[in-house]
Image (cartoon, rainbow, N blue to C red):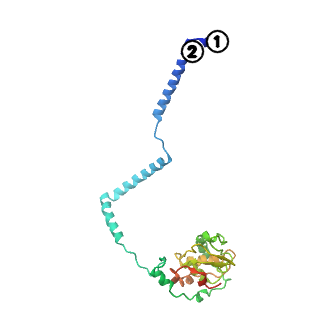
Amino acid sequence: MDPSRDNLIIRFTTFWWALGTFFIFAVMLAVIWLFNHSDPTTMEDAAAKSRYITKAKIDAAQAANISPEVLDATIPKLAKQLAATKPLAVEQPAQLVPGSDTAKKLASAPAVDTKAIDVSDAAEAPIDPAVMAIGKTQFLVCAACHGQNGEGSPIAPPLAGSEWVKGPISNLIRIQLRGLQGPISVKGTEYNMPGGMAALAYQTDEQIAGVLTYVRNSFGNKASAVKPEQVAALRSEVGKPQVSAAELTKP
């Protein structure tokens, strides 16, 4: 047996050496924390710092060009001008409030004779690649419902092999300018889209002609090109209620 294990003086000395070592270690940690302590920086703090720097630069640039007094005096004047501004009247608005007098007037207007519009070149006539390029770009909007390859979806009928696509041109133009409501039969299957198809009259005559030409000559379809002048001839349809299959010429 080691006689030092029962020596009280050795045990007492060892205890105080251990306590002193622990204390020194704690002091060292406290000093390190004191000199290296800083507020925690989060991602939001870092982002806010850059925003504050940018804001300071903008404020300085604005103050150098426009005094706060001039800015404060200008804002009330501009607000009065905006409040007094009246909308300009247009003869053919692209968007109408359903049930309004203008909407009723347009709905009761006589339909355009589409016979001349539907007389087109033969389907074998060459298609301008530039027109197809325009149509392919515009089709990105249509693809959201009709599918990237015209295969259709649960909310829109297919365009590939559709008798309506290869049929009279005026049908497609009127659908594009007015939208479509109610059931429509495509390749023997009836489709009834919720809310119908929205009008896309915001497109130019060239864009509408391009996308319809693209649809008529893609996805296995082959038909004559659509010309901008054919679209222009039906621009009076814009603003009328969504067209129904019953109003269209049967393909």
Q: Position of residue 43 (x, y in %)?
A: 50, 47
Q: From what the image shows, is residue 57 above or below residue 82?
A: above
How many numbered circles are shown? 2
10 Å neighbourhood of mark 2: few (<14), some, or many (≥20)?
few
Q: Is residue 217 left or right of residue 22?
A: right
Q: Position of residue 161 (x, y in %)?
A: 69, 77
| Relative depth, front residue between 124 and 234 | 234
Check contact, mark 1 vs mark 2: CB within 8 A. Answer: no
* Cα–Cα gap, marks 1 and 2: 13 Å
Q: Residue type at mark 1?
A: Asp
Q: Residue type at mark 2?
A: Arg
Q: Quadrant of the N terminus?
A: top right
Which residue is outermost to the top?
3
- Give SS at disc 2: helix
10 Å neighbourhood of mark 1: few (<14), some, or many (≥20)?
few
Name the residue beneath numbered marker 2: 11
- Give SS at disc 1: loop
Q: Position of residue 246 (x, y in %)?
A: 60, 83
Q: Quadrant of the C terminus?
A: bottom right
The numbered mark at residue 66 is none
Q: Earlier in the sequence, mark 1 or mark 2?
A: 1
Residue 13 lies in quadrant? top right
Residue 74 lies in quadrant? bottom left
Residue 86 lies in quadrant? bottom left
Name the residue beneath numbered marker 1: 2
| Relative depth, front residue between 220 and 99 | 99
Q: Position of residue 176 (x, y in %)?
A: 57, 78
